[in-house]
Image (cartoon, rainbow, N blue to C red):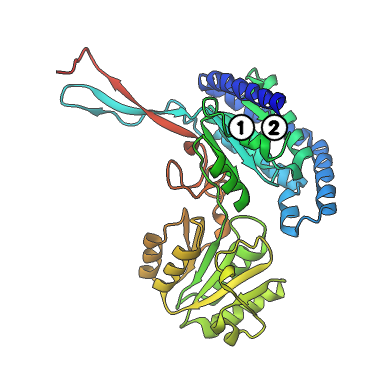
Amino acid sequence: MKNESVELKQLALAARRASLRLADADPAMKNRALLEMARLLRDRTGAILAANQSDMERGRAGKLSAALLDRLLLTEDRLATLAKGIEEIAALPDPVGEISPLTKRPNGLLVGRMRIPLGVILMIYEARPGVAADAAALCLKAGNAVILRGGSDAADSNRMFGDVLRSALDETGLPVDAVTVVDRGGHESIAELLRFDEEIDLVIPRGGEGLIRFVAEHSRIPVLKHYKGVCHLFVDRDADPQMAVDLALNGKVQRPGVCNAVETILFHEDCAPELLPLVCRELADHGVRIRGDARTRQLYPPAEAATEADWPAEYLDLIVAVRVVPDLDEAIAHIRKYGSNHTEAIVTEHYESAMKFLRRVGSSTVLINASTRFADGQQLGLGAEIGISTTKLHAYGPMGLEGLTTQKFIVFGDGQVRE
């Protein structure tokens, strides 16, 4: 472990040196590197998919769940989406060096703020190998170096992504150590990286509850959590029936293994007799298991009995918890008690209810009459995301370029001294 610790320290130091060069890099050079990343992802699709197939075979042999296998899977379409997302990042304005409006003080000083990179980001993630491309692209554009520590389930895919991303940096004259893939060791190597608070500026863990807790407990470095997605859909008393069905199906069925999938559906008691059976039947027809409270089981007898453990559960599967609540206030209380500050949606035709839901639900993304699946950086115009922060400090919600920078004060004077 001693030799490995020295190696990891050297990787972190190299990333720190690369971050200093990136902070001064010309925006045009960073954009060329991003476009080269996108090009290489397309050109090396076959090799990436072959590596991913090896990971998938190990995953199936290891009895990974269907949801985790879906997260692990790469396809031509998913790689094309990654490449397109990187091109969109290249087209975005460069945040580094952006200056806020200046304020003139009584003594004549002009005071403002300038956006600067954070430095070195440690990205720790499980299963989803595509995170490597999104994270590297966003960090590069924002002037940060990134250390990528992916899960062992995606080891071959992670290594291939690392080769592609570093090749793009090399071919465009940027330091290759701006992107580093760490694929050795288990939790011991993660714990070691988390000790390097002089070399690494921010840790972003993206994975299951166990990973998040491990990182939070062992890190000397500030942690920005991408916590689990216990996402709710509330069907209000005057909800449009077809909209309720559409949002429930899209939120639960389209990709059940992602963090913005619906895990709990709450029905206002006034609409429940009509809409709850309708929505539950549609979900069941698409293979979804319903776990409901007593009132749900009265209205839809095929539902299984929900227990207390179901309300805070992130299933990441074709399972949904359903509950009938007396009113909007109780729906909000339920979300506050059991939610994870990720994403919540309401189906309503009532303006006052919509605005109350927006104001009082404190999650990082709140939607009115739209699917929870839109809680995604690319869908919200960020180009891509490095994660969805459920930590209110620094950044909250889908994290794009701005979330990977900070601001320093800048002051212009003409010789003023403090009296």
Q: Which residue is mark 2?
A: 182
- Determine crowd level at label 1: few under 14, some 14-19, many 20+ residues with C-alpha closer than 10 A: many
Q: Would you say the residues marked 1 and 2 are in contact, meaning their CB atoms lie under 8 Å apart?
A: yes
Q: Amino acid at mark 1?
A: Leu
Q: Quadrant of residue 204?
A: top right
Camera-side residue: 351 or 225?
Answer: 225
Task: Find disc 1 in the rendering and name its residue.
Answer: 193
Q: Nearer the viewer, mark 1 or mark 2?
A: 1
Q: Position of residue 148 (x, y in %)?
A: 65, 34
Where residue 55 appears, as percent x and y from the top left, is 81, 45
Q: Is residue 209 left or right of residue 399?
A: right
Residue nearest the viewer, comparing 177 with 312: 312
Q: Nearer the viewer, residue 135 or 316?
A: 316
- Please report the residue visible at 38 percent of the width from the left and 70 percent of the height from the top: 353
Vertical comparison of 103 with 171: above or below: below
Q: Left or right: 164 with respect to 306?
A: right
Q: Quadrant of the N terminus?
A: top right
The type of residue carrying mark 2 is: Val
